[in-house]
Image: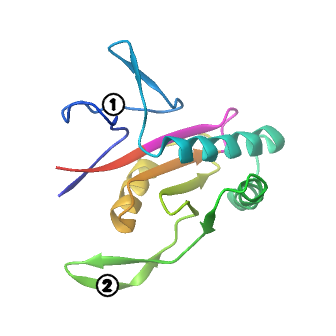
Amino acid sequence: MPVVSQQVVQRTPPKIRLINSGSLQIRLRDRVLSLLHEEVTRKIIGAALEVHRALGCGFLEPVYQEAFEIELNIRRVPFVAQPELEIGYKGQVLKQKYKPDVIVERRVIVELKALTKLTTLEEAQAINYLRASRLDVALIMNFGARSLEWKRFILTKR
């Protein structure tokens, strides 16, 4: 059964699982380790920071969605907005589809929020999106806080 953690660092022993939120590098044993899909993650966070810098907090999610898509286009970052993904249940495909906000470079799910604070509900949503999409990395980007808030999740297998 797949397991989701907020960050698993590559090139480390399998038992080391680290949490990453708001930072792209983790120092472990005086050595900086790279993260799964780090380059793509940097592009996404950079674009989101620019959107938040320009618009600030206080808008509804669709405003940030449109601005984020424009910023990704400006930066020539390949993405698909709100694609329909199938959800499987016990070997059958459900009629209901899942629509992530954005999938960047066919590798990272990006969920955009405009909340005063992220909760465990949004984290559970990201975990389920990873399971449904079979992708490895998800980012929740929260534009509703005074400073851009993000959390990164990685799907690992036991």
Residue denoted by label 1 = 18
Residue 143 point in image, percent of width and height:
67, 44
Check if residue 2 falls in the magenta segment.
no
Gap in Å between the C-alphas at discs 1 and 2? Answer: 33 Å
The part of the chain drawn in magenta is: 143-152
Mark yes or no: residue 61 visible.
yes
Mark yes or no: residue 119 visible.
no
Task: State whether the magenta stretch is mostly helix, strand or loop.
Answer: loop
Q: Amino acid at mark 2?
A: Val
> Quick check: 14 left or right of 98?
left
The residue that appears at 52% across and 29% down in the rendered structure is 23
Residue 8 point in image, percent of width and height:
33, 38
The residue that appears at 76% across and 58% down in the rendered structure is 63
First in residue order: circle 1 vs circle 2: 1
Residue denoted by label 2 = 93
Residue 70 point in image, percent of width and height:
77, 59
Q: Amino acid at mark 1?
A: Leu
**Foreground residue, 42 or 5?**
42
